């Protein structure tokens, strides 16, 4: 489960715009898109089902408006 928070923009609960959360392998190939929609500020969580993926290191990237962040995760089977 991946949890993320979208902060309030300008002190109001407004829509930030397109939010994407994607998972990539070590070579930079996209292996899953978990979120691809318009969201309002708030706290969210999404379940990542690694069906068909082998053990290893993966990266997930959150993009919301002008914000982008990438984190590393380890998948153990």
Image (cartoon, rainbow, N blue to C red):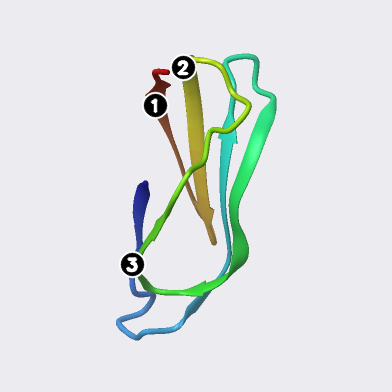
What residue did someone put label 2 on? 57
Which mark is drawn over residue 6? Answer: none
- Secondary structure beneath dot 3 equals loop
- Label 1, label 3: how many angstroms apart (C-alpha)? 23 Å
Q: Nearer the viewer, residue 33 or 68?
A: 33
Residue 9 lies, in percent from the top left, at 39, 75
Q: Of residues 70 and 35, which is closer to you in this image?
A: 35
Q: Position of residue 69 (x, y in %)?
A: 44, 41
| Residue in the image at 34% along x and 74% along y | 8
Near-viewer residue (14 or 47):
47
Mark 3, residue position = 7
Secondary structure, mark 2, is: strand
70 relative to 15, above or below: above
Give the class, few, some or many, for how many residues have Cα within 10 Å of label 3's Cα (few <14, many ≥20).
some
Sequence-earlier tag: 1 or 3? 3
Whichever of callouts 2 and 1 sits on the residue coming sooner in the sequence is: 2
Residues tagged 2 and 1 counted as in contact (Cβ below 8 A): yes
Circle 1 packing at 10 Å, graded few (<14), some (14-19), many (20+), is few
Mark toward the start of the polypeptide (3 vs 2): 3
Q: Quadrant of residue 13?
A: bottom left
Q: Is 38 situated above or below 26?
A: below
Q: Residue at x 48, y 43 (%)?
A: 48
Give the total of numbered labels.
3
**Vertical side of 33 occupied by 24: above or below:** above
Which image quadrant is residue 20 in?
bottom right
Q: Position of residue 55 (x, y in %)?
A: 48, 15
At x 63% / y 39%, what residue is drawn? 32
Task: Report which residue position mark 1 lands on.
Answer: 73
Spatial CA distance of label 2 from label 1 is: 6 Å
The quarter in which the C terminus is drawn is: top left
Residue sitting at x 42%, y 22%: 75
């Amino acid at each position: 489960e991946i949890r993320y928070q979208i902060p309030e923009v300008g002190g109001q609960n407004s829509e930030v715009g397109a939010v994407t959360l994607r998972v990539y392998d070590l070579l930079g190939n996209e292996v899953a898109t978990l979120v691809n929609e318009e969201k309002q500020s708030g706290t969210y969580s999404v379940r990542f089902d690694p069906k068909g993926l082998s053990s290893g290191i993966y990266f997930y990237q959150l993009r919301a408006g002008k914000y982008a962040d990438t984190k590393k995760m380890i998948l153990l089977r």
